[in-house]
Image (tube, rainbow, N blue to C red):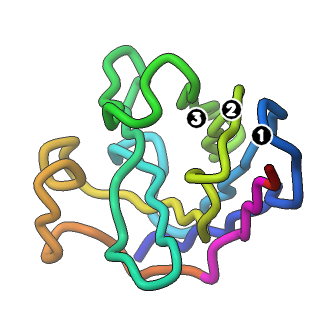
Amino acid sequence: QLQLVESGGGLVQTVGSLRLSCVASGRTFSTSAMGWFRQAPGKDRELVAATIKRGSSSYYADSVRGRFTISRDNAKNTGYLQMNNLKPADTAVYYCNAASKLHSLVAGITEDIGDWGQGTQVTVSS
């Protein structure tokens, strides 16, 4: 079972930037699609970005497209989420996760999505 640990969150002002990291251990990270999710207080967890095994094709939620960039370094078993032009609405706990297929992450197919980690808090002040 793949295990993922998120880091890089923090407090930032509006229009600021943060880069989140997700370090994987366990089964081979490079064979999995990976995604970044977030959950704000009182709201459901939502997928914000995902990418296929080799990172050449990605999905972005409308709310973050053009501001967030997902990437991965399979040699380091690490995924990243570069977040620019942050807004208070981006405040949430951010999680990474993996699945055998990108579609599983986009469609929320829980049987193919791994266990959730602790996440990393991102707070954007106005």
Instruction: Say what amino acid the circle numbered 3 marks.
Output: Asn
Q: Is residue 51 visible?
A: yes
Left or right of 52, for residue 64? right
Quick check: 114 above or below 87? below
Q: Is residue 123 magenta?
A: yes
Q: Which residue is mark 2?
A: 82
Given contact means CB atoms under 8 Å apart, are the residues at marks 3 and 1 in contact? no
Residue visible at 13% across and 44% down in the picture: 103
Q: Secondary structure at mark 2?
A: strand
Horizontal and vertical percent for residue 108? 16, 63
Crowd rating for badge 3 (residues with CA inside 10 Å; few <14, some 14–19, many 20+): some
Quarter of the image with the N terminus is bottom left
Crowd rating for badge 2 (residues with CA inside 10 Å; few <14, some 14–19, many 20+): some
Given contact means CB atoms under 8 Å apart, are the residues at marks 1 and 2 in contact? yes
Instruction: Say what amino acid the circle numbered 1 marks.
Output: Arg
Label drawn at residue 19: 1
Residue visible at 45% across and 63% down in the picture: 27
Q: Secondary structure at mark 3?
A: helix
Left or right of 49, for residue 12? right
